[in-house]
Image (cartoon, rainbow, N blue to C red):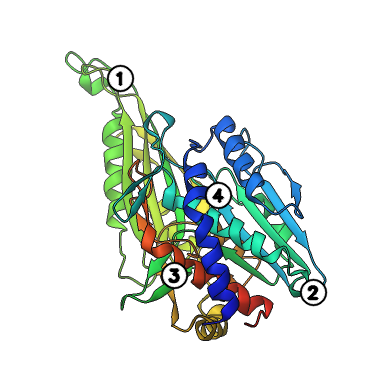
Amino acid sequence: MNRWVQATGRELVRHAERELDALVGVSSQSGDTRGAEEALAVCSALLPTEVEIERPPCSSPGYAADLIATLRGNGERRLMLLGHVDTVVATDEHRTLEREGGRLVGSGAVDMKGGVVFALGVMRALASMPDHYDELALLLVTDEEWRTHGLTHADRFAGFDSCLCFEAGQQAPDGGEGVIVRRKAAGTLRVEARGVSAHSGSAPDKGRNALLALATAAQNVASCHDPRGAHQLSAVPTIMNSGEAFNVVPSGGQLFCDLRANELAAFDSVIDAVPDKVNGATLDTELVRQWPGMDAREATRDLLADASVRLGRPILGLERGGASDASHMAQRISLTVDGLGPRGGGAHNPDEFVLAESLEPRAQVALAVVATLLGIEG
């Protein structure tokens, strides 16, 4: 193993559990401005003193400003690190970090405060090595979990050589080390129904039932589900709300569906499958959340091969279905690698966890990739 990777990984892990405890100790549910500010204050305290810190507006209105920390160097390469501090778990269900056997359990531990700890450690390690880069930037956003549109800052980093995203790590099928180089496009389809209310006992046929119209829409969306097809399309109705009283024909409501495919264009067939009207009730369809797909398999092939040599064991490029900000950055920076955080499970639940035993080997994976990109020999 590259000596720098080994020594730096050991130093990073020496601080990792304590730093994870500090970050997980802050409830930073997506949209909670106060929680986001507190989480970013913790991150700022853990960054090297040499960084320049900016607070650009978040991509989502009403959210706390994002954070960009920059190190300036004397080299040629420009590398960005990417993460988010917002979590899904509500504040009243938040769980601070506890060690349960080999698990570090706490809200947001694996998605993705464990990865943020790694990114902060990389920044500290490289602060004293300015000859290896021209610019090293860390972007931490506050809205990744619930953003409905694009990442505002993507264009700013379009000229960078590479992007490393520290979402949770993953094992390869053979138990080896994996990183994420391919993700599906993701979309949220909203169908809004407008009908006519009527008394469901004395005059049901005078109404136009929005609930039944939404049920038809849900069935039509589900009929498009074809995960083994050419586009690997999954179309899953997930939420339906309609009706306000048990004895009234529902006059309105909404249906939400989760869509995943290799590319965003595959969602057109699902939208087309929803009719404009069902038995007099009208249906309006809109794709309210769009995340592009990511396919960096070819762009990262040589990088992962060289990083495997520095690591002393294989690093494999894997696929994952969930969305990530790496998907947005991959549209601007072809050499994008995701899944560089520690391994764990239970994401989006109060009991999510990081596997303590994964901290050092996963830190080594991330550092081997960094060493390869910046030409750090050991």
Per the model, the C-alpha gap separating discs 3 and 2 is: 28 Å
Q: Which residue is at a point 51% across and 38% down the rendered structure image?
A: 30
Is residue 166 visible in the rendered structure shown here?
Answer: no
Q: Are marks 3 and 2 in contact (CB under 8 Å)?
A: no
**Dot 1 corresponds to which residue?**
244
**Dot 2 corresponds to which residue?**
75
Q: Is residue 191 left or right of residue 211?
A: right
Q: Which residue is at a point 40% across and 64% down the rendered structure image?
A: 358
Residue at the right extreme of this rendering: 74
Closer to the camera: disc 2 or disc 4?
2
Q: Earlier in the sequence, mark 2 or mark 4?
A: 2
Q: Earlier in the sequence, mark 3 or mark 1?
A: 1
Q: Which residue is at a point 26% across and 48% down the rendered structure image?
A: 219
Label 3 crowd (10 A; few <14 / some 14-19 / many >=20): some
**Dot 3 corresponds to which residue?**
361
Q: Are marks 1 and 2 in contact (CB under 8 Å)?
A: no
Per the model, the C-alpha gap separating discs 1 and 2 is: 64 Å
Per the model, the C-alpha gap separating discs 2 and 4 is: 27 Å
The answer to which image quadrant residue 184 occupies is bottom left
Give x and y (percent) for residue 31: 54, 34
Please state which amino acid type lies under the numbered disc 3: Pro
Please state which amino acid type lies under the numbered disc 4: His
Task: Count how many numbered circles sit on residues in the image.
Answer: 4
Q: Which residue is at a point 44% across and 61% down the rendered structure image?
A: 342
Q: Secondary structure at mark 3?
A: helix
Please state which amino acid type lies under the numbered disc 1: Glu
Q: Secondary structure at mark 2?
A: loop
Q: Are marks 1 and 4 in contact (CB under 8 Å)?
A: no
Please state which amino acid type lies under the numbered disc 2: Gly
Give x and y (percent) for residue 213: 30, 37
Q: Which is nearer the eye, 85 or 11?
A: 11
**Dot 4 corresponds to which residue?**
84
